[in-house]
Amino acid sequence: TIEGSDMQGNLRFKACSIRGLGEVAFARGNFAVAAQRFAETRSLCTEMGVPARKLYSCSPFYTLPDRFEGWVLYLECRSPFTSAI
């Protein structure tokens, strides 16, 4: 959980969890919440010194499948996030 990640100081797990919440919001069409979650994820990546596109490079088996495309669209500043932010 995100709370557990905070207690343990595990920023990578927290970033992956928040990104997952963003994907859920994106799948439900709630683009404003998705954008908030993805912005939090990007901030955590910056804090860790990890490029956002490399969030899963150390743990390729923990990545979400390609059908979850909200994170990539967010990073590329593509619709629907251009109007949600």
Image (spheres, grey):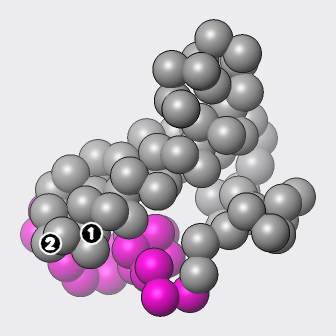
Image quadrant for the C terminus? Answer: bottom left
- The answer to whether residue 76 is visible is no
- What residue lies at 71% left-to-right and 40% top-to-bottom? 12
Disc assigned to residue 29: 2
65 vs 25: above or below: below
53 or 66: nearer the eye? Answer: 66
Badge 2: residue crowd in 10 Å (few <14, some 14–19, many ≥20): few
Per the image, label 2 sits on a secondary structure element best described as loop
In this rendered view, identify the residue nearer to me: 74 or 26.
26
Secondary structure beneath disc 1? Answer: helix
Q: Residue at x 19, y 78 (%)?
A: 80
The reply to whether discs 2 and 1 touch (Cβ–Cβ < 8 Å) is: yes
Q: Quick check: 72 left or right of 4?
A: left
User: Which residues, given as a range, are shown in magenta?
Assistant: 66-85
- Residue for badge 1: 26
Q: Which residue is the extreme one toward the bottom?
A: 67
- Amino acid under label 1? Phe
Queried whether the magenta region covers residue 6, the answer comes back as no
Total labels drawn: 2
